[in-house]
Image (spheres, helix red, strand yellow):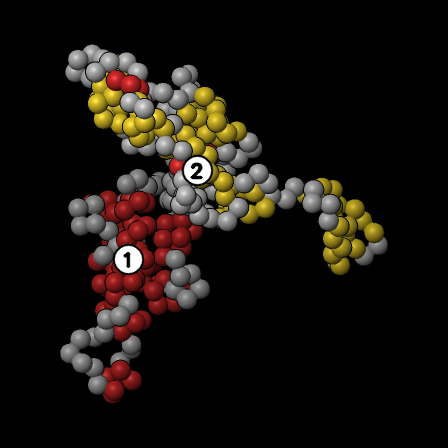
Amino acid sequence: GAVRGCGPPGCPAFRPAAPEGLADTAKKNFGGGNTAWEEKTLSKYESSEIRLVEIIENLCDSSNFECNNMVEEHEERIEKWWFKLKKKYPDLFKWFCIETIEVCCPSGTYGPDCLACRGGSERPCHGNGHCDGDGTRGGDGSCSCNKEYTGDFCLDCSNGYFSTLRNETHSVCTGNEVFDTCLDLSCDASCIDCTGEGSDKCKTCASGYMKEDEKCTDIDECNLPEKVCMKENQDCVNTSGSYKCVCSEGFEENDGTCVQTVKTGKWLFNNRFFLKYAISTTWMCISV
């Protein structure tokens, strides 16, 4: 059965605590000003049992019963990792929760076999929703889309929203939202509060809008003098009241950076070489 504490809420509680515990104790020592003899004779604090105890005590929030109970139940395994496996497996969360007791999954994956969420593990639900079971051994990987989006992969726009960008990896939907005040007035999306319908009836402009010609108009962040999308190969897409940074055409997001998309064609055989053709029209020979 599932081990208590490492499934929700255990996984989220344990994961950030592990590296923090390691970092918080990294610069400490045995206390009292160790002599050279003590440092030489005793095991160094860095790999000592004293430090291990401090780390274990800080793995979970004190109020998280399930997480603390899980750590206590598997304390011997954590000790084994500390003294024998830490150098080979420096990520305690990955080694313990994902690979050893197998109750968590890497971010962007779900279920007993840690399958990729819809839209891929890098950007589950294409960044427009939440993957059911993300990071756990449960769920079915389906997407719960943000209000602007719909569809199995959160790429389509909901009713009342329209598409300002759509390609294989990104979809941006925007639209005018309606807010009701205590006076039962329908305020424009550009208003925080209003005296009637329309952007010219705003008392105060909402974030991302500015007063212009007696109306609250959208600020085009993409045309501001100061660049808002700072990463290489990244474009700015203006949306109502905001903006979104997306990878340029021909690039896709990978670990927070935009890398060139290369679609591989067929492999051709020629004696001891493979001949590979990609959409960049580059031929590459690889000896085997």
Tell me if 9 is positioned left or right of 168 in this view. left
Residue 49 sits in quarter: bottom left
Residue at 21% x, 58% y is 57
Vertical comparison of 216 with 269: above or below: above
Disc nearer the start of the sequence (1/2): 1
Residue 150 sits in quarter: top left
Question: Circle 1 sits in a helix, a strand or a loop, which is it?
Answer: helix
Give neighbour class at mark 1: few <14, some 14-19, many 20+ (Cα, 10 Å).
some
Question: Circle 2 sits in a helix, a strand or a loop, which is it?
Answer: helix
Which mark identifies residue 51? none
In depth, the one of 265 and 78 nearer the eye is: 265
In which quadrant of the rendered image does the C terminus lie?
bottom right
Where residue 231 sits in the image (x, y, percent)?
Answer: 46, 48
Amino acid type, callout 2: Asn
Residue that badge 2 annotates: 223
Between circles 1 and 2, the one closer to the viewer is 2
Q: Can residue 130 be seen in this view?
A: no
In depth, the one of 274 and 52 nearer the eye is: 274
In which quadrant of the rendered image does the N terminus lie?
top left
Amino acid type, callout 1: Glu
Residue that badge 1 annotates: 20
Residue 107 sits in quarter: top left
Give neighbour class at mark 2: few <14, some 14-19, many 20+ (Cα, 10 Å).
few
Vertical comparison of 211 with 271: above or below: above
Where residue 48 sits in the image (x, y, percent)?
Answer: 28, 71
Where residue 72 sits in the image (x, y, percent)?
Answer: 24, 53
Mark 1 and 2 residues: CB-CB less than 8 Å, in contact? no
Residue at 31% x, 71% y is 47
